[in-house]
Image (tube, helix red, strand yellow):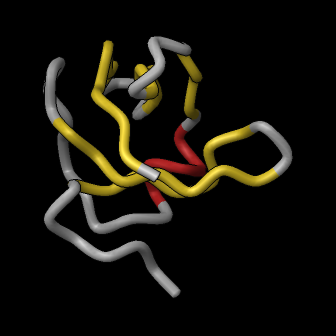
Amino acid sequence: MQATVRIFDPETRSGSVFLDDGTEIPFGSDAFDAGPLRLLRSGQRVNIQVTDDAITVITLSTFPLPG
């Protein structure tokens, strides 16, 4: 699933994304650390994996989700 970064805090490695329907979903450091990222910017397109209504992995839209 794809989303757009709303906000990212590099200190806590957490933030939130907007789904294409406008729904905002937060993500924590566990989801950020599950991918190969170092930083995210507002407005950046990302791939996310959601399990039980929580983001479990977030990565750039050009990277595959871990598998």
In the rendered view, does 36 fall on the left or right side of 12?
Answer: left
Residue 1, x across and y down, in percent: 46, 52
Residue 5, x across and y down, in percent: 29, 25
Up-down relation of residue 3 to residue 65 (above or below): above
Which residue: 59% across, 50% down? 30
Which residue: 76% across, 53% down? 51
Residue 38, x across and y down, in percent: 20, 51
Up-down relation of residue 22 to residue 58 (above or below): above
Extreme bottom residue here?
A: 67
Q: Quadrant of residue 45?
A: top left
Which residue: 29% across, 29% down? 4
Extreme front residue here?
A: 21
Q: Quadrant of residue 36?
A: bottom left
Q: How many marks?
A: 0
Which residue: 40% across, 34% down? 13
Q: Quadrant of residue 61?
A: bottom left
